[in-house]
Image (cartoon, rainbow, N blue to C red):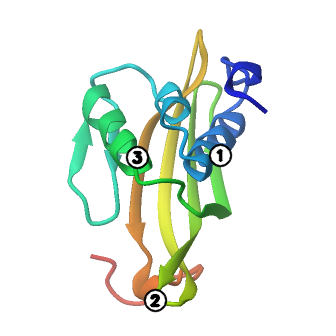
Amino acid sequence: MSRIAKPLLFASSDECERAFYEALETADADAAVDLWLDDADICCVHPNGPRLQGHAAVTGSWRAILANGPLRIRPASKKTLETPTIALHNVVEEILVQQGRSQKVVHVIATNAYVKTPAGWKMVLHHASAAPEGQATEVESPSGPLH
């Protein structure tokens, strides 16, 4: 589907999130930028990266990342908390990376936040962290200190 045929107004946070990962997989920087709320308070943290705040910093980072080509990324496991105007999605991203002649799937744990606006749902936060040893595990009752 061409960008022209895609909806400009996302009816749900899930729709916005699907468009986000599709933009990453197709290296469509314009589509990725269009998903973000144009606001000074949006925030993005890439794995092992600094806290980027504001529309210019956040969207500039995505343009730079996607200039290198598509990301082979798929959201796998998702937990959602949603109110009528705010949605939080915690996802495990499966990323296919090339290591020499072989490929490997590594996990990144990400939290994506969305707000409902008159222009539909928009992204306001993407915070991603590498999973320990590259593999995410589900822990229902943590043992030991968390911090």
Task: Measure the C-alpha gap from mark 1 to mark 2.
Answer: 26 Å
Which is more foreground, mark 3 or mark 1? 3
Image point 66% across, 18% down: which residue? 8
Camera-nearest residue between 96 and 106: 96
> Which quarter of the figure is the N terminus placed in?
top right
Task: Measure the C-alpha gap from mark 3 to mark 1.
Answer: 15 Å
Amino acid type shown at disc 3: Ala
The relative height of residue 58 versus residue 74 in the rendered view (above or below) is above
Which is more foreground, mark 1 or mark 2? 2
Q: Quadrant of residue 138?
A: bottom right
Image point 31% across, 43% down: which residue? 61
Q: Quadrant of residue 118?
A: top right
Residue most extreme to the front: 101
Amino acid type shown at disc 1: Glu
Image point 59% across, 42% down: which residue? 23
Secondary structure state at the residue bearing disc 2: loop
Amino acid type shown at disc 2: Gly
Mark sitting earlier along the chain (1/2): 1
Secondary structure state at the residue bearing disc 3: loop
- Which residue was labeled with disc 3? 67
Residue 129 placement (x, y as % from top left)? 38, 66
Task: Measure the C-alpha gap from mark 2 to mark 3.
Answer: 22 Å
**Tag shown at residue 100:** 2
Image point 33% across, 45% down: which residue? 64
Q: Is disc 2 surrounded by few (<14), some (14 to 19) or many (20+) residues within 10 Å?
A: few
Residue 98 placement (x, y as % from top left)? 50, 80
**Tag shown at residue 22:** 1
Mark sitting earlier along the chain (2/3): 3
Camera-nearest residue between 129 and 6: 6
Secondary structure state at the residue bearing disc 1: helix
The relative height of residue 134 versus residue 121 in the rendered view (above or below) is below
